[in-house]
């Protein structure tokens, strides 16, 4: 159930970034997370729908999730390999002297916002002009 905490964290971080850039409405947020992070995407989507209704800035926003493949490094033969396919034992040399290079992390990849300047220029006044911010 750590997905609720991740959504809470993402909303708080995106809110800070939005405030720094005078953004008032979020269109979408893309999260990246590792293949072996244990994150259940269906829970993330459900929590996002529930949580985003509590903040006007996020109302009707969309959450996108992208998976970062898990890759393990072998200290013995200096080769990278797929963690999920082979686990902790190197498929090239059989060594157990391995460590996870990537695939357990979670980060905010991008934030898509409504641009109020472009939206005001449209005849119907709807917020249909997205902009995108990519955190460093």
Image (cartoon, rainbow, N blue to C red):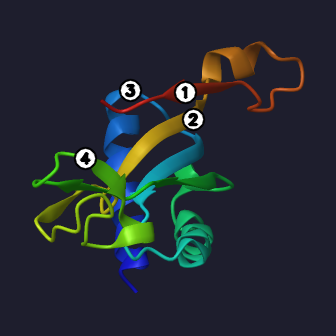
Residue behind mark 1 = 132
Is residue 32 positioned above or below 90 on the image? above
Q: What's the residue at 45%, 68% (across, down)?
A: 85
Gap in Å between the C-alphas at discs 3 and 2? 12 Å
User: From the viewer's perspective, is the residue at label 3 or at label 2 nearer?
Assistant: 2
Q: What's the residue at 41%, 58% (across, down)?
A: 33
User: From the viewer's perspective, is the residue at label 1 or at label 3 nearer?
Assistant: 1
Residue 40 numbered tag: none
How many numbered discs? 4
For the N terminus, the quadrant is bottom left
Residue 11 horizontal/vertical position (percent): 41, 57
Residue 121 horizontal/vertical position (percent): 76, 12
Gap in Å between the C-alphas at discs 4 and 1? 36 Å
Residue behind mark 4 = 79
Gap in Å between the C-alphas at discs 4 and 3? 42 Å
User: Could you tell me which secondary element the residue under label 2 belongs to?
Assistant: strand
Q: Which of marks 1 and 3 is nearer the N terminus?
A: 3
User: Could you tell me which secondary element the residue under label 1 belongs to?
Assistant: strand
Q: What's the residue at 36%, 64% (across, down)?
A: 83
Residue 87 horizontal/vertical position (percent): 32, 73
Task: Say left or right for 14 vs 77.
Answer: right
User: From the viewer's perspective, is the residue at label 4 or at label 1 nearer?
Assistant: 4
Residue behind mark 2 = 112
Q: Is residue 36 visible?
A: no
Residue behind mark 3 = 21
Q: Earlier in the sequence, mark 2 or mark 4?
A: 4
User: Could you tell me which secondary element the residue under label 3 belongs to?
Assistant: loop
Q: Nearer the viewer, residue 27 or 117?
A: 27
Question: Are the residues tagged 2 and 1 within 8 Å (C-beta)?
Answer: yes
Dot 3 crowding, Cα within 10 Å, few <14, some 14–19, many 20+: few
Dot 1 crowding, Cα within 10 Å, few <14, some 14–19, many 20+: some
């Amino acid at each position: 159930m750590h997905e609720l905490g991740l959504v809470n964290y993402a909303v708080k971080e995106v809110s800070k970034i939005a405030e720094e850039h005078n953004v008032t409405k979020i269109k979408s947020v893309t999260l990246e997370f590792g293949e072996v992070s244990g994150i259940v995407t269906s829970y993330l989507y459900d929590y996002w729908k529930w949580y985003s209704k509590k903040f006007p800035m996020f109302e009707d926003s969309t959450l996108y999730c992208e998976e970062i493949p898990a890759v393990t490094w072998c200290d013995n033969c200096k080769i990278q390999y797929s963690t999920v396919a082979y686990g902790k034992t190197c498929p090239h040399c059989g060594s157990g002297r391995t460590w996870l290079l990537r695939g357990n992390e979670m980060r905010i990849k991008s934030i898509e916002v409504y641009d109020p300047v472009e939206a005001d220029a449209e005849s119907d006044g709807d917020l249909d002009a997205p902009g995108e911010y990519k955190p460093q």
